[in-house]
Image (tube, rainbow, N blue to C red):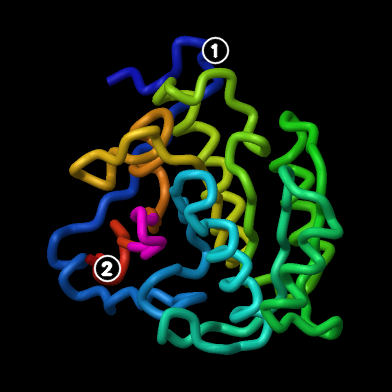
Amino acid sequence: MNTSYSGTSSEVAQPFQFMSIKEVYDAPPEDVSYIVDGLLPSSGTSALIGKPKSGKTTFARQLAVAVAQGNEFLGRKTEKGAVLYLAMEEKQSEIMIHFQQLGLCDSDPVYIRCGAVEKHQAVPMLEASLKAIPGVKLVIIDTMFRFLSVKDSSDYIQVNNALEKLGEMARSSEAHVLTVHHMKKSLTEDPIDAALGSIAISGGVDTYMVIWANGAGVRTFCTQQRYGSNMD
């Protein structure tokens, strides 16, 4: 059988390495480590979906404070470490005031970058930052498509490819990368369809989180997770 590529005869394809089912059964179980216990896996990605003023940015900043200080978040243990927060839609002064209100100290390891980014260079620049700043456990990108280089957010392949790059970066750095994103105008019966844009957003992350508020200001939160248990 000819295993060479159609390009040049010197490029010989190597076979995939398969495991027998016995080897799979005998392999030790793979432990999943978490930045937030049972919710946000280390070396993983997540998307936080919500309408404007629904509380998603506050939720993300509370998470940043909890991880930086090693405090519980939603009643769950966190892995303490540094946090990188990329805020592309708000002023630095507003962020400073909000973090002060949330109890963030000037000695806590939270690093903030405000303003627009060059989308074509955003992922490699963030990857370089993760290598330059030690002990980063969490990266928050607010918002998703002000960071990712995607021409059409409704195009499944474009969105999936962009999220794959974030996933590869998370796995190599062992940090969790959370992206904040907008919800559709009307809330669907199935929250997994709530994200504005392609369904690849919900399928391309390890933890998909939706937050919304009713007329009385009561906020509801639910998750769809690749690891751990879904939060109803």
Q: Which residue is mark 2?
A: 231
User: Where's residue 175, x and y in %?
Assistant: 60, 66
| Left/right of residue 179 with respect to residue 41 in the rendered view | right
Along the viewing direction, whichever of 173 and 84 lies nearer the viewer: 84
Give the prevailing secondary structure in the magenta stretch: loop
Which residue is at the front of the view, 226 or 104?
104
Query: As drawn, is 17 to the left or to the right of 11?
Result: left
Q: Is residue 160 magenta?
A: no
* Amino acid bearing label 2: Met
Q: Position of residue 112 (x, y in %)?
A: 80, 61
Q: In which quadrant will I find the C terminus?
A: bottom left
Placement of 224 over or under 105, stated as above or below: above
The image shows residue 37, relative to residue 192, as above or below, that is: below
**Which span of residues is magenta-colored?**
213-220
Local crowd size for mark 2, using a 10 Å CA cut-off: few (<14), some (14–19), many (≥20): few
Q: Return the disc, 1 or 2, that comes first in the chain's sequence.
A: 1
Q: In the rendered image of this protein, does residue 7 appear above or below residue 45?
A: above
Query: Circle 2 sits in a helix, a strand or a loop, which is it?
Result: loop
Up the image or down, 170 lies above or below 81; here it is above
| Label drawn at residue 8 | 1
Residue closest to the eye, 128 or 215: 215
Amino acid on which the number 1 mark rests in the picture: Thr
